[in-house]
Amino acid sequence: MLGGASDQVDVAIVGAGPTGLYAAYYAGFRGLDVAIVDALPVVGGQVSAMYPEKVIADVAGFPAVSGAELIARLEEQVQPFAPTFHLGQRVERMTSRSGAVDGAAGLDLHTDARTVIGARTVIVAGGVGHFSPRRLPTAAGLRAEDVDSFVTSLDPYVDQDIVIVGGGDSALDWALMLSPVAGSVTVVHRRDRFRAHAHSVSLAQKQGVRLLTRAQVVGSVYDHELEAVLVEHADGSRTTEPCGRVVAALGFTARLGPILEWDLGIERQRHIPVGSRMHTNRERVFAAGDITTYDGKVPLISVGFGEAATAVSNACRVIHPEAPLFGGHSTETTTPVARSVAVGEVA
Ligand SMILES: Cc1cc2nc3c(=O)[nH]c(=O)nc-3n(C[C@H](O)[C@H](O)[C@H](O)COP(=O)(O)OP(=O)(O)OC[C@H]3O[C@@H](n4cnc5c(N)ncnc54)[C@H](O)[C@@H]3O)c2cc1C
């Protein structure tokens, strides 16, 4: 951090979608320290939640890249600057501090996990809103701690009987990922056909994944821990499937929710108006990515990247008025990654 109060970061970013991740990188590049918050337990925003397997063809420099690969590259790019990630937390409130008492003017972000992040500037990269996983019906009686909406690590699934609910690409991809390590994997889908790629479905069958179609999870069996789920089939019959952990791959809903209350002059309940510096109507608050609106706005990942760099550069001027708006080209500034490439450590 280049000077300033030590109890607050230079830039707090709301949203770890492609725009927020790139903003975190660019802020690191400008020598600013960063905290980044997302309601999802993983980074990547819409890309991770809605289309990780789709091929994206209009991001500059990538003729074709899967959503998951693009997000992995963004993570890799930001990693040397070690921003603080607060994942699985929704920012509820944004309050301003005048700095009259302690000289630390800025804002506080308050999350639903009671974290308070002090920041000298904020970049709102909230996209189409915070994502929440679609839940299984409460009638199934599953405890929240036994149900995952993302598979982020294989460890909790080793030797477990896993039931995955859903019929899309994520359900089948996770089945393929988990079947080599799990005790068993059963996919339960309420329709008679899977929406996932046919190739993934046949691969799953070959890997020994049980595929139950026209079926729903309607109950659970606990003996201190989850032992099994009850599955109801189209003919009304019920079977008991061994299960130590459930993955609910049912998709996500997005809602702007709390951001509507932050006095940012939100238009049509969806977009934050910004000027050419990506500044909002609130002092020290910038916005970038899908959430912004201005004359001629195009909601694309590539546009969000540009807006992120503009927002960070202008936030940098707020924090360090003596700093230039343009921080120079990356080719002239040796970042840790650039240095490793230069000396041949990174291919
Ligand atoms: C099916 C589909 C295909 C697409 N294909 C393409 C394509 O080919 N090319 C292209 O350029 N674009 C494509 N897009 C659009 C692209 O995904 C978006 O432009 C991009 O994701 C916007 O990035 P973002 O970071 O601004 O917002 P998002 O990706 O929406 O990320 C915003 C993040 O902010 C978080 N958030 C919001 N509010 C809060 C809060 N209060 N607290 C904490 N976290 C919060 C959300 O949980 C989310 O993770 C596609 C979109 C979809 C749905």
Image (cartoon, rainbow, N blue to C red):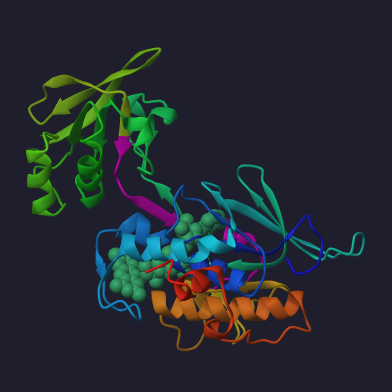
Q: Quadrant of the C terminus?
A: bottom left
| Residue found at x 11% / y 21% | 237
- Residue 272's x, y, as percent? 56, 73
Q: Which residues are magenta?
A: 247-271
Is residue 259 shown in magenta? yes
Left/right placement of residue 19 relative to residue 285 reads left
Left/right placement of residue 24 relative to residue 183 reads right
| Residue found at x 12% / y 42% | 204
- Residue 223's x, y, as percent? 36, 11
Q: Is residue 255 visible?
A: no
Q: Is residue 327 above or below residue 337?
A: below
Q: Quadrant of residue 274?
A: bottom right
Q: Quadrant of ligand 1?
A: bottom left
| Residue found at x 90% / y 60% | 102
In the depicted view, which residue is nearer to us: 243 or 321?
321
Is residue 54 shown in magenta? no
